[in-house]
Image (cartoon, helix red, strand yellow):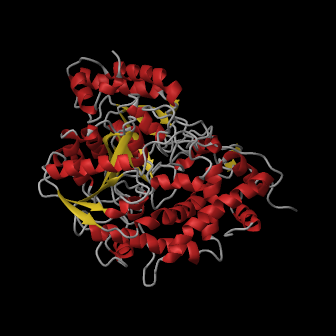
Amino acid sequence: MSAAPLWTVHSIRDALLAKKTSARELAKDFYAQIERRNPEINAFLALCPERAYAQADRVDAAIATGQPLGSLAGVPVAIKDVISTEGVRTTCGSKILENYTPPYDATAIERLENAGAVILGKTNCDEFAMGSSNENSAYGPVRNPVALDRVPGGSSGGSAAAVAAGMSVVALGTDTGGSIRQPGAYCGVPALMPTYGRVSRYGLIAFASSLDRIGPFATNIADAATVMSVLAGHDSNDSTSAAVDVPDYAAEMEKSLDGLRIGVPEDYFGAGLDLELKAKIMAGIALLEKLGCKRVPLKMPHTDYAIATYYIVATAEASSNLARYDGVRYGLRIQGDTLMDMYRRTREHGFGAEVKRRIMLGTYALSSGYYDAYYLRAQKVRALIAGDFANAFEKVDAIVTPTAPTPAFKLGEKTADPLEMYLADIYTVTGSLAGVPGISIPCGKTAAGLPIGMQIFASHFGEARILQLARAFEKAGGFSI
Amino acid sequence: MKISREEVLRVAQLAHLELAPEEVETYRSQLDEILAYIGKLQELDISGVEPMTQMRPQAAGRPHQGSATAAGAEGAVAAGTEPELREDVVVPCNVAAAVLAEAPDAVTPFFRVPKVIER
């Protein structure tokens, strides 16, 4: 049996129940697909076949004895390498954690496995999730499966590429400023950033704690909805996770779009947006109107300040979170004559250039004499950006924008200019700062065949609304518009 | 120029990073460009805006309330409930051996580091 891309969460379930395949057989097929495609794509950093086959056998035993199956039974899953997996090496794409094996599982991992998912391995990413192209990994860049000379986006580039190349049915990524949505757009797969607090982050290795979120990549909206049902919910191990009821996403997503108001903010369609891409997004919006949505023009006047705000807030938090890598408790140690020498040499050798750049920027923004001018001001502008969303959601049910200003760029194209790279996240960081959920869904391709992503935001805990719009769009053929 | 060579060295020291001599100017010019871009935040009038210091989850169906100037901050703090704190009960947590096993240099039950206190 070939070609994993045909499998979905739902077709796997049917095939397992009809005994047309087994979970073990499926896992084997996916490992074969990884063997075929991964050498050129570099999406995986570690595989865990022992764990995968043990889990597959549990699923197969449950089927043989007629026990109830979890909603992800037998589904092959890939996990971004910033999420802790007990006994499976977890590097965050960094040399400083090259030999780190977590002693526990993240809550998201536990939930996936309790639902029957089969974890295949860990995916490549920008070091500590800092990047927009996956070129900041200490283990080499990921290549976009759609066009191998192009980046897959970042930082969750390995997860996006794994799903796009049929090496996994679904995958987990993390999003701090666009790191799920932007690679989803570049690789042409649906990619959902849930509301801040919707999914537990226990066991997620922190980058920027007021922004980090875990969410799924899938090949279709129903699969994304199923994974969200598994991930969402309060966790007593994460005080930032919300005790808010989890809707029945599978039922909600089938509701009609009739009368829904979709906001189209002019601030996301200005200079800098690729014209070919703009035309497709406009066609996508027209399709949503045809499906019953009412289009509402919007102004979100602080959009243009989001990147500047983000690169203060995120780097300040990173400078604090990454202070823990000092060569004492885990990971790399480079010996020094004194404790201080050891800290400095370990961090100098262990961190890559972008991570050091961000630690320095964050340290600078928080340092005495600059705090008010940078960090405090950014926190205030962040409130204004969140206010743009609050105002918008008084008038509309969802906001529709492009996910990124251009399609996937070429490897090496932006590595010389960090600021240029940051601007790839210009449309995604806004929602990150505001805490609202957002998805990127495929919206056609450029003439050159590169995927285009359309972004949909909803208000806090509005994942069901997002899935509803995305599902109707998918059913109406919007993905290949 | 937003940031000097001396400031880069001072920041590196604060962050416990030991920069190679050739790195200093590279970082200086890159940070300079980024800080110049970030300078656009100075254009905004932020008088009367409360900083957004909390990302507390909010009740479903209750978006941020209030005016454009205050909504974000107010929404983040006021609309949320208190964080969900768990019961303060003792639970078994026998991971010390597993944690120490990950240390570059450990002698149970300690992490070992270069000498800190000089006699």
x, y (%) of residue B67? Answer: 31, 79
x, y (%) of residue A196? Answer: 37, 58
Examine the image and state in which quarter residue A344 appears.
bottom right
Q: Is residue B71 above or below residue A207?
A: below
Q: Please name the residue shown 48% across and 28% down the image.
A: A48
Image side of residue A350 versus residue B54, left or right:
right
Choose between A246 and A383: the one closer to the eye: A383
- Note whether residue B71 is visible: yes
Image side of residue A443 versus residue A248, left or right:
right
View extreme (top): residue: A1
Choose between A272 and A172: the one closer to the eye: A272
Q: Please name the residue shown 24% across and 42% down the image.
A: A478
Choose between B78 and A273: the one closer to the eye: A273
Quadrant of the image containing the N terminus of chain A:
top left
x, y (%) of residue A191? Answer: 35, 44
Q: In this view, does B91 lie above or below A125?
A: below
Quadrant of the image containing the C terminus of chain A:
top left
Examine the image and state in which quarter residue A219 appears.
top left
Q: Please name the residue shown 62% across and 55% down the image.
A: A324
- Note whether residue A459 is visible: no
Image side of residue B31 versus residue A109, left or right:
right
x, y (%) of residue A114? Answer: 33, 38
